Image: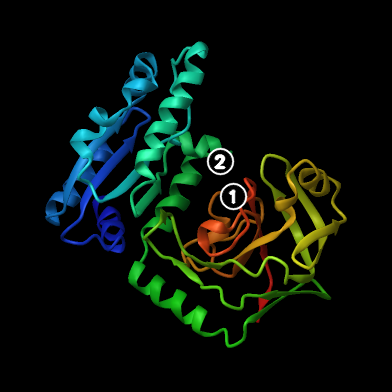
Amino acid sequence: MNQNTIGKMINAMKISTDDIVLLNYWSEGDDSELKLFENELNSKGIKYKTLNFTEEFLIELAGKGAENIDDSFFEPVKDCTMVIDVLQRPAGMPPRGLEKDKYAEFSKVLRSLFSFMSSHEKLIQITMPSQTNAALAGEDYEDYKVRMDKALNIDYEALALECQKKIDSFTSNIITIRTGEDSTLNMDVTGREWIIDAGEGAFPCGEIYIAPLEDKTNGTVFYKNLFIEDVGSFDNITITIKNGRVTDSDCDAFNELLSGQEEGARIVGELGIGMNPAVVYSGKGAALDEDALGTFHIGLGMNYLFGGINKSRFHMDFVNVGEIL
């Protein structure tokens, strides 16, 4: 990633002059990009403090035990007002070399770290175009890197404007989605607020999303390609939704997925619309599909964090293309 792209991202975060940034770097071994972020923050006069979570440091923390992740551990960074996680690897991923008998303690360490980080009003996470993230996405690294670099190197001000335009284009509280030859899905969003994801939450970004009323989505939605995370891809699938709940589909794997979850997993919790013009929809569950301009995604399950009331532990997005009215 180059300095120019990082500069665009930092600008999009709308960091105020009063903010002190806690810059968490979750490293896969190469710290060169950490220096780029630090250089950019310095050049903009933004105050920050760094925690470099190398694999060696994480192993050390697990060895010492979660009881050491206490007030004294966080004392040097307690005045930070916001958090930026730079993720060369997922924060919850056990480091290479961690002994199996330390996994439970590592999980406790993570809980203590995440509890502190999530207490901040503003938490931004950046998924980097790294070898580890490409492997976890099941994609060739060079292809992944090219797509991620394009998705990140965009005009964020223009993206935010286009997101607002899209929201303003909806003149009714009933959102209608048409897919396939004759599938129609109606969502009631009365009293719910659209949220713009254009650089103040996660990177890559580029969507608007809303929590529809939990018992007011009705109809059918057709997927030419239905991708289910960790399960597979299925063709020509129709899902039926009544009073906000998925009641049926003609995909056995999808039905089996939901039957193994709590009841709240069947509730339609989110409508998201992709807005990033630099992302091309693959239809194969690629890492960036839900941000692709021209797509939408239906999220099942939890939505209380963005305006809904469903506190299910389950949340999964299903990306599609269609007409949204």
Q: Percent x, y for residue 284?
A: 66, 51
Look at label 2 and name its amino acid: Ala
Q: Is residue 98 left or right of residue 188?
A: left
Residue 10 figure quarter: bottom left
| Residue 203 shows in the view | yes
Q: Residue furthest bottom?
A: 171
Who is closer to the viewer here, 162 or 308?
A: 308
Q: Percent x, y for residue 221?
A: 77, 67
Image disc number at residue 286 = 1
Look at label 1 and name its amino acid: Ala
Q: How is the image coloured?
A: rainbow
Residue drawn at 43 percent across, 23 percent down: 95
Residue drawn at 40 percent across, 57 percent down: 201
Image position of 40 with respect to 308: above or below: above
Tell me, yes or no, whether the two marked residues, 1 and 2, touch with CB atoms within 8 Å. yes
Image disc number at residue 68 = none
Image position of 240 with respect to 51: above or below: below
Residue drawn at 65 percent across, 70 percent down: 213
Image position of 51 with respect to 224: above or below: above
**Label 2 CA crowd tier, 10 Å (few <14, some 14–19, many 20+):** some
Q: Quadrant of the C terminus?
A: bottom right
Who is closer to the viewer here, 279 or 92?
A: 92
Q: Percent x, y for residue 50?
A: 22, 38
| Residue 31 shows in the view | no
Q: Is residue 5 left or right of residue 227?
A: left
Q: Secondary structure at mark 2?
A: helix
Q: Which residue is mark 2?
A: 137
Image position of 114 with respect to 20: above or below: above
Q: Percent x, y for residue 253?
A: 81, 45
Q: CA distance from mark 1 to mark 2?
A: 7 Å
